[in-house]
Every structure is written in C-alpha cells, then in structure tokens.
Image (cartoon, rainbow, N blue to C red):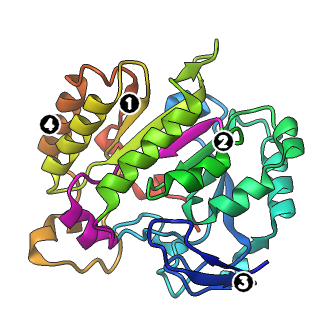
Amino acid sequence: MAYYCCDCPRNCGAQRDGTNGKGFCGAGETIDVAKVMRHMWEEPCLGGSKGVENIFLYGCNLKCVYCQNYKINGTDNTFDKEKLRRLGTKEFGALLTEAAQTGASAVGIVTGDHCIRQISEAITDDVRHKIKVPVIFNCSGYAKPETLELLRGKIDIFMPDLKYVDGSLSLDLSRASDYPSVSIAAIKKCFEMTGPAVFGSDGLLKKGVLVRHLVLPGQIRNTLGVIDLLNSTFAPGDIVFSLMSQYLPVPGLCLPEKYKRLSGRLTKAEHKKAAEYFANAENLTLGFTQDLSSSDEAFVPDF
C-alpha cells in the first residue's frame, strides 16, 4: 500500500508507491535487492571462517559523496536497474530465510535504513523462527529511534556507522547537518534493544551493537571526536567498535579545496594516530582496527 514517508530523519513526506519514490532515497514500496553474496571480510567476530551472507539493498537515505558502494546507492546513473530484484515483504522474508540456510555464520542486511518499515514487516515471527543464525542490520546510523523500534526482536546485531561528530562535515559530505546528533541517538536506541555484546563459545558475536567508523583522509580530528563520543557514552563491554581504514577515492569525486585529501588515501601517520587513540579509549574494550592493506579495490563487491 502506498504511503507518505517520514520514516527517516529527512522527513521527505514523499509518496512511496510501486517501485518508485520521490523522496531523497528514491525508494518505493518494494525492497530492492542489488546483490546477494557471501562476504568473507566482515569483522572477525561476525563471519568467522564461514563469512556473512549479505543482502545488499539498492538506494540510501544518506548517499555520502565518497561511498564505496556508489553504484547501488542511487547516484550512479549508469547502474542497470533491470538487475534489481524488487521484492515485496513476503518475498524478502523468504530471501532472508534462504540466505540464513547457506552455511554462513550470519545473514546481513546491508544499507537498509530506507526500508526499515518494510524489513520489519518481512521478518514475521515465522521467518524469525526459521532463521537459526544471527541477523545483522548494517546501516548508516541515520535513522529515527522510533523507526528503529520496529526492528525490536527481529534483529540480533545492529551494525550502525558513526561517521561524523562535525555537523558541517556531515552537511558537506552527506547532506545531513544533523547526522551527529541523529546517529548517536540511533546507536543508543540499538543498544537499548540488544543490551551489551554477547559472544558465543565460538567467539562470534551473537547479539549486540557493533559501531563502525571509516577514517577519512584529512579528517583525523573528526575520528578522534567519534572515539571520544563513544568512549564517554558507553561502558566497557557494552559495544564493539570497528575502526575502518578501507577508504578509497571514488571515480569522479569533485570537492572543494578543503577536502582535497579525499582524492587520495589514508596515510600511515593518520592510521597510526587513529589506532593509538582508539587503543587508549578505556571504555572501548571490544573492537578491531583495520590494517591499511584493506584499502584495496579487491575488497569492494562487484555490483
């Protein structure tokens, strides 16, 4: 059924019907799946030796200018939309169930912020009962707490980003000046729904919140602020923190002079400073720091 959407913080109020929408994310009523694949390079506590069976959705309510998945975030006009699987909620529930039975350690929904309502409807009690591995919700962190509430009891592991603590930076790079306040509220909501991180005897995360942060070239102060914010918000053992170093400049990136460093890669000095700062954050006792070698096109899914 078509509806006027204010599910995310952009509050577009746009009508979503059929397969098209006029809002920022461009989504209609369907859940548009761009790719399903086994991902072996998620954090070790998620995939282990078996990896995560990831379902990549098309579209996004943030569309960062440096997005490594730009081909499927709705900004790449060359992407062939005929490749998409436009699914209703019942069909998506069946896909989730199928993905969870492939032998992976977990099943992941990637970039689902703009389809939370539909995903919630898809994960019925019957679907949830059939899925015997953790369900991961991998998102940008740009979501309303009241919308995230729709996923209570349906998601085991929330994996939100905390991209920025600087509103001017989030405005310039993601067209969302309110991202810092919105994202920390969203992360708190995710934690309220899952509680502290729970690991199984196999060492894998079974329930909880894993917060990701991508270090941006030339923006190390923003990264230190993100670490400070999480360190002051949570207690030891509450969340898992992933400091990511896989930034790659996307084709055609054109930005003001003050962001010229985004045309290159993270330096060893920037990586070292961020890693050391994280290591000294006394409340962030669980987590990972990516090696600089992760900044490689080989690790980016082929869409």
Q: Are marks 4 and 1 in contact (CB under 8 Å)?
A: no
Q: Which residue is mark 1?
A: 288
Cα gap from disc 4 to disc 2, whole angstroms:
37 Å
Q: Earlier in the sequence, mark 3 or mark 2?
A: 3
Q: Local crowd at mark 1 within 10 Å, few (<14), some, or many (≥20)?
A: some
Q: Which residue is mark 3?
A: 17
* Residue 236 covered by magenta stretch: no
Does residue 41 appear in this view? Answer: no
Cα gap from disc 3 to disc 2, whole angstroms:
25 Å
**What secondary structure is found at the residue carrying circle 3?**
strand
Q: Are marks 3 and 1 in contact (CB under 8 Å)?
A: no
Q: Name above or below for residue 20 compared with residue 135.
A: below
Cα gap from disc 4 to disc 3, whole angstroms:
47 Å
Cα gap from disc 4 to disc 1, whole angstroms:
15 Å
Q: Earlier in the sequence, mark 2 or mark 1?
A: 2
Q: Local crowd at mark 3 within 10 Å, few (<14), some, or many (≥20)?
A: some
**What secondary structure is found at the residue carrying circle 4?**
helix
Q: Nearer the viewer, mark 4 or mark 3?
A: 3
Q: Earlier in the sequence, mark 3 or mark 1?
A: 3
Q: Which residue is mark 2?
A: 152
Q: Which residue is mark 4?
A: 273
Cα gap from disc 3 to disc 1, whole angstroms:
41 Å
Number of numbered discs overlaid on the protein picture: 4
Q: Are marks 4 and 3 in contact (CB under 8 Å)?
A: no
Q: Residue at x 57, y 87 (%)?
A: 22
Q: Where is residue 211 drawn, in percent x and y? A: 42, 40
Amino acid type of disc 4?
Answer: Lys
Cα gap from disc 2 to disc 1, whole angstroms:
26 Å
| In front of the other: 248 or 76 | 76
